[in-house]
Amino acid sequence: MSEDSRVSCTVDLDAPGKRSGYLNVPWSRDDSAWGAIRVPIHVVRGGEGPTVLFTGANHGDEYEGPIALLKLVPRLDPARLKGRVIVLPSMNHPAAQAGTRVSPIDDVNMNRCFPGRRDGTPTPMLAHYVYHHLVSRADVVADLHSGGKTLDFVPSVTMHELDDPALMGRTKAAIVAMGAPLALILEELDSAGMLDGAVEDLGKMFVTTEFGGGGSTTPERVAIADRAVHNLLCHLGLLDEAPLPVAAPPRFAHTPEDGYVISDDAGIFEPLVELGAAVGTGQPLARVHFFEEIGREPATYVAPRDGFLYSRHFPGLVKRGDCLAVIGDDWRRG
Ligand code: ZN
């Protein structure tokens, strides 16, 4: 599956030891005729063992993943590592530089363009390299997300429901071991082109996260991300160290299809429920206030089902079509 790419890598991905360098994504443009985007990459290869690919900033306004990965790299010692770790702390580097979800260069959402295109604009060209040259080397891919500027989440490690029961079981064990407060099976609203499906279709283990959101972070959420990264490497046997302790085993939940609440209105968003709180069917979750129309009553949005508030819209203003809330519920299947 390794195939020709226009992207090159300045480090040897396969030799033993520890190296840092760049993916070089050609980007000829008005202010740099022979220019390129330089995406930092780190590779640490120790003894026999699996290869784990960590990616942060697939969306450029999500911060816990990049912070945890930038802290992980200096700690990794090839002499004590059983396997190989490949780290892209800011995979969608132009978006991370701009602090935006999608790349400002070509307006492409990196997590909607996998497996990428060799001759695409810079974002699909980079995705094509990641898929054909990094995912191809990996046994496990951990793509670390948060909610970005427009969503906020109960910190969670997530996966999808998989057809292969053995892979499903191994992935469930891994997300529980990562030790976030919530381990969750995510039902996507729109999954075409995600790194998730591209990896899962190869029969490889894929885990992802929603550590927080709002376009920033907190010490508590960074600590959850640090623990998730460390504990995954311990769980997979790459680090012969103790996993970081958790206060309580994670709640195992999912996002049912009928748990998404989409706004039909534009106005000021008033949250009525704290993240993580239990909700019952019909309970008001949020109001939208029509501050431009004198006397118009606010619109109230209610919980479509029982569960808990897993995610909410973050900015103070909401538009028609925005995701207002996502209700999670306990996973009751095997
Ligand atoms: Zn994301």
Image (tube, rainbow, N blue to C red):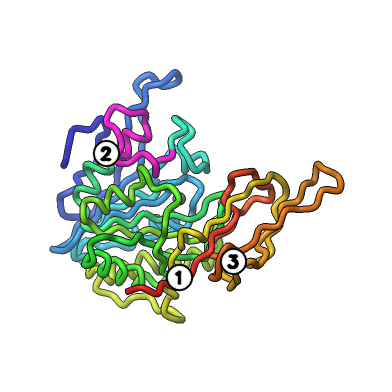
Residue 48 falls left or right of residue 270? left
Say which label, 3 or 1, has the lower sequence index. Answer: 1
For disc 1, the neighbor class at 10 Å (few under 14, some 14 to 19, many from 20) is: many
Residue 231 falls left or right of residue 251? left
For the residue with label 3, is its CB less than 8 Å from the closest atom of ligand 1?
Answer: no
Tell me the amino acid under the disc marked 2.
Answer: Tyr
Residue under circle 3?
275
Residue 260 x, y percent position in the rendering: 53, 57
Instruction: State the count of labels.
Output: 3
> What distance separates the C-alpha of mark 3 from that of mark 1?
12 Å
Which one is in front in this view, the residue at disc 2 or the one at disc 3?
A: 3
Residue 291 x, y percent position in the rendering: 80, 46
Residue under circle 1?
182
Tell me the amino acid under the disc marked 3.
Answer: Leu
Q: Nearer the viewer, residue 281 or 285?
A: 281
Range shown magenta: 109-128
Tell me the amino acid under the disc marked 1.
Answer: Leu
Residue 320 in magenta? no
Say which label, 2 or 3, has the lower sequence index. Answer: 2
Say which label, 1 or 2, has the lower sequence index. Answer: 2
Residue 44 is labelled as none
Residue 129 is labelled as 2
Instruction: Using the image, determine if residue 82 lies above or below residue 73.
Output: below
Residue 170 x, y percent position in the rendering: 25, 68
**What kind of element bears circle 1?**
strand
Q: Tell me the quadrant of the picture where the C terminus can be found.
A: bottom left
For disc 3, the neighbor class at 10 Å (few under 14, some 14 to 19, many from 20) is: some
Residue 297 x, y percent position in the rendering: 80, 52
Q: Tell me the quadrant of the picture where the N terminus can be found.
A: top left
> What distance separates the C-alpha of mark 1 from that of mark 2?
32 Å
